[in-house]
Amino acid sequence: MTNNNNQFDYLFKILIIGESGVGKTCLLLRYAENSFTANHLLTIGIDFKIKMVNIENKIIKLQIWDTAGQDRFRTITKTYYKGSHGVILVYDVCDDKSFANVKNWIKQIEQNARSNICKILVGNKCDKPERVITEEDGIKLGKFYNMNYYETSAKTGQNINEIFDYLTHEILKVHQNKENSNKN
């Protein structure tokens, strides 16, 4: 894709997944609109936002999909893994159930996404004093699944840009390596 007439060089699809209530929508709204709302309705099905970024002099259009975390929507979200380039797997550092269920989300990724999908693990709500999952536990779990780990706060904005920047760089690397191998 060329960069003429305000077009983009790459289009990357990113999924945000995790249990209901971990803050997926808040992460997306903080990144895409720099806004935060403490109380909002649960995502029904799926929603997405578009954000244009410039990385390595390439215009990249990010299509960021916010998925519902409730069990009844899991079959709907399975189809959204197809064609995805990246996954942000989110748990709530104040909710040990959401942390324990990371393994189930990993299975979803393995069953439904392409094998070279870029993924990161995110412990959200790190601004809250009632946390029950330590940063060390998050780092250890990320290493176990071969994923970089970040702690975020959609409320304060901590590490929000960093998770999307990191993931976009990783996706771009995979894409450029694929392009280079196709040229040879």
Image: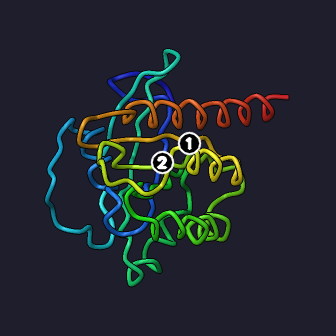
Which disc is residue 149 wearing? 1
Instruction: Locate residue 153 relative to residue 110 in the image: left or right.
Output: left
Question: Looking at the image, do the residues carrying marks 2 and 1 touch, with CB atoms under 8 Å apart?
Answer: yes
Q: Which residue is mark 2?
A: 122
Q: Name the residue: 43% across, 55% down.
A: 16
Tell me where residue 71 appears, x and y as whole percent: 42, 81
**What is the distance, in whole Å, between disc 2 and disc 1 at their CAs?**
6 Å
The mark nearer the N terminus, 2 or 1, is 2
Q: Is residue 175 above or below residue 78?
A: above
Which disc is residue 70 wearing? none
Tell me where residue 127 appears, x and y as whole percent: 30, 42
| Quadrant (top left, top right, bottom left, bottom right) of the C terminus | top right
Q: Is residue 107 above or below residue 92?
A: below
Q: Name the residue: 50% across, 63% down.
A: 99
Q: Name the residue: 41% across, 54% down.
A: 93
- The crowding category of the residue bearing disc 1, from other C-alpha atoms within 10 Å (few below 14, some 14 to 19, many at least 20), is many
Q: Which amino acid type is marked by label 1?
A: Tyr
